[in-house]
Image: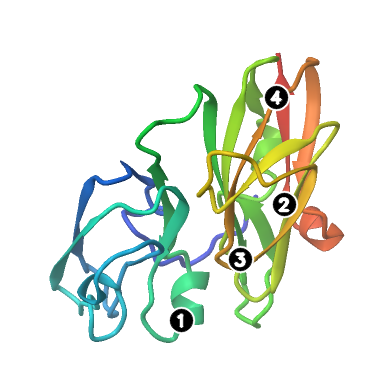
Amino acid sequence: APGVFFPAWTYNGRVPGPTIRATEGDRVRINFINASGHPHTIHFHGIHSAAMDGVPGQGEIFSGETFVYDFIAEPFGTHHYHCHSVPLTQHIHRGLYGAFIVDPKQGRPEANEMVLVMNGFDTNFDGENEIYAVNTVGFAYMVEPIQIERGRLQRAHVINLTEFDPINSIHLHANFFNLYRTGTSLEPDEFTDTISMAQAERHMIEFTYDEPGHFMFHAHQTEFVELGWISAFQVS
């Protein structure tokens, strides 16, 4: 947010970390180098062996060490990864997370795709968030709305990694979307305009705007909206 800085812990210098994408059945190999002063892991949501689980004793590495995560990408869907070192609240809240998207072998219809990671930041370390956002910067997509085309299918991978609050949500204005829960189905589970998500829940949504204009989307908790989690699409 303007004038607000946060001492984040990061994967590759950014929050969220890099989006990792694969096709179902691909072999994924992540070379993890811990250049920080704390022990860290990468825990992937998905299916893998115990040795690749990224928890203390199995894939946790200490300062200056390296580890290779090696597994087959499955199942297809919208997933994520995060640090699983303790204290877990600190490692997640400070920014050690990112999207992990596994595409189905047969593919999906062509669409404009985006990743929306819902997060929050406790800037004074009192156990409550002062800033809420999608993709880290409060109000960013109100200042520079996401540009999309009228009539083109939009696909958003929505991931909730907000610490300290049990529930986050997303609401599209003037539209409904097809909801694919966890992105693990080829057929939608629901047709709606608002969903609530607990921490670590993630879903894929698809929608199309048929009219040009400026359309908001945001959390449906007014506190979150006023503290940064409000965005917009500019449909042309």
The amino acid sitting under disc 2 is Trp
Question: Can see residue 16?
Answer: no
Q: Which residue is painted at 82% across and 60% down in the image?
A: 221
How far separated are the C-alphas under marks 2 and 3?
A: 11 Å
Q: Is residue 97 above or below residue 55?
A: above
- Name the N-terminal-most of marks 1 and 2: 1
- Name the N-terminal-most of marks 3 and 4: 3
Mark 1 surroundings: few (<14), some (14-19) or many (≥20) residues within 10 A: few
Q: Is residue 116 left or right of residue 166?
A: left
How far separated are the C-alphas under marks 2 and 4?
A: 22 Å
Question: Dot 2 lies on which element?
Answer: loop
25 or 211: nearer the viewer: 25
Question: Dot 1 lies on which element?
Answer: helix
User: Which residue bears the numbered disc 1?
Assistant: 88
> Where residue 66 appears, x then y in whole percent?
14, 68
Question: Dot 3 lies on which element?
Answer: loop
Q: Identify the mark at residue 162; answer none if there is no mark.
A: 3
Kindly indicate the quadrant of the structure image that contains residue 139. top right
Q: Identify the mark at residue 208; answer none if there is no mark.
A: 4
Q: Nearer the viewer, mark 3 or mark 4?
A: 4
Q: Which residue is painted at 66% across and 37% down in the image?
A: 141
